[in-house]
Image (cartoon, rainbow, N blue to C red):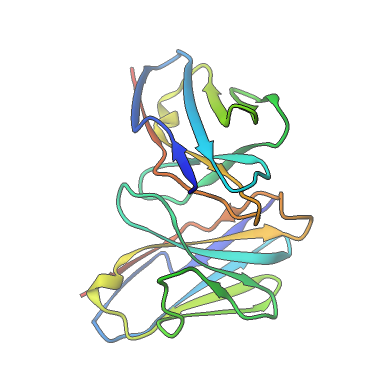
């Protein structure tokens, strides 16, 4: 079956760095997306990885290891507005995104 | 770029009413649009995938006659919840993907919060 494993909740301090890990099992693989979803709102696209390695985009970076079925999202210089859920969504062989419940990130002052 | 507009943002109506939700891609052509529903603190649940000019592909367990999807143009898809009942109350979100390939990200509308009394 298809499966995504992320921590349910994480807490970090404003200005710090946090890494959100994701392991996945899919039928085929066509890349992995990270989305941010604030409470009561729709997801917004953050990053896409299809090759192994690190993709950096401002304060956010995303890493992928296809052989390990593993990705992480790294958030630097945390701000209060970064409090949200972060969704790891791999794409299977049918180009369909597989969604988990995400990681709720709580930022404290 | 990649803006998706969804409306209405909130609907409150009586049981038995049919509700239509529109999803528009404002600055790109969306060859594929997706309709999701999401319950509080739960993951997104894909309801159906629609390609412009063809019938939608529904996920297992989603009633086609209950959730009517029309993707009449490259910028517009609609979801009609027919004869809605309280159990249909949920957060409905559409997303759209451009035509540059299936690896393109899905861009989401703001969602529609549907409450059936």
Residue A101: horizontal and vertical position, in percent?
39, 43
Q: Please report the residue visible at 56 percent of the width from the left and 44 percent of the height from the top.
A: A26
Compared with B61, A44 (above or below) is above
Residue A41: horizontal and vertical position, in percent?
42, 50
Residue B115 image-quadrant placement: bottom left
Residue A81: horizontal and vertical position, in percent?
43, 31
Q: Please report the residue visible at 45 percent of the width from the left and 69 percent of the height from the top.
A: B60
Residue B71: horizontal and vertical position, in percent?
62, 77
Does B104 sit left or right of A91 as displayed?
A: right
Query: In which quadrant of the rendered image does the C terminus of chain B lie?
Result: bottom left
Towards the viewer: B98 or A77: B98
Compared with B56, B24 (above or below) is above
Compared with B42, B12 (above or below) is below
Q: Please report the residue visible at 43 percent of the width from the left and 53 percent of the height from the top.
A: B44
Q: Please report the residue visible at 58 percent of the width from the left and 76 percent of the height from the top.
A: B56
Q: Residue furthest top?
A: A16
Towards the viewer: A27 or A77: A27
Number of numbered discs: 0
Q: Residue furthest left?
A: B117
Q: Residue furthest front?
A: A1
């Amino acid at each position: 079956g298809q499966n995504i494993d992320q921590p349910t909740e994480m807490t970090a301090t404003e200005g710090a760095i946090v890494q959100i890990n994701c392991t996945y099992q899919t039928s085929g693989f066509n890349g992995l997306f990270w989305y941010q979803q604030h409470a009561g709102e729709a997801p917004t696209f953050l990053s896409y990885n299809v090759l192994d390695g690190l993709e950096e985009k401002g304060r956010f970076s995303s890493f992928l290891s296809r052989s390990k079925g593993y990705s992480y999202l790294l958030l630097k210089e945390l701000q209060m507005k970064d409090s949200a859920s972060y969704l790891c969504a791999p794409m299977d062989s049918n180009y369909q995104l597989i969604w988990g419940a995400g990681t709720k990130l709580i930022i404290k002052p | 770029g990649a803006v998706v507009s969804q409306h209405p943002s909130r609907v409150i109506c009586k049981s038995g009413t049919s509700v239509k939700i529109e999803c528009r891609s404002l600055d790109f052509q969306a060859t594929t649009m997706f309709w999701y529903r999401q319950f509080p603190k739960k993951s997104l649940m894909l309801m159906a995938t629609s390609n412009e000019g063809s019938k939608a592909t529904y996920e297992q367990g989603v009633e086609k006659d209950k959730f009517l999807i029309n993707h009449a143009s490259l910028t517009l898809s609609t979801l009609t919840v027919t004869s809605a009942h309280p159990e249909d109350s949920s957060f409905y979100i559409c997303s759209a993907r451009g035509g540059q390939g299936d690896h393109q990200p899905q861009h989401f509308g703001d969602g529609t919060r549907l409450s059936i009394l």
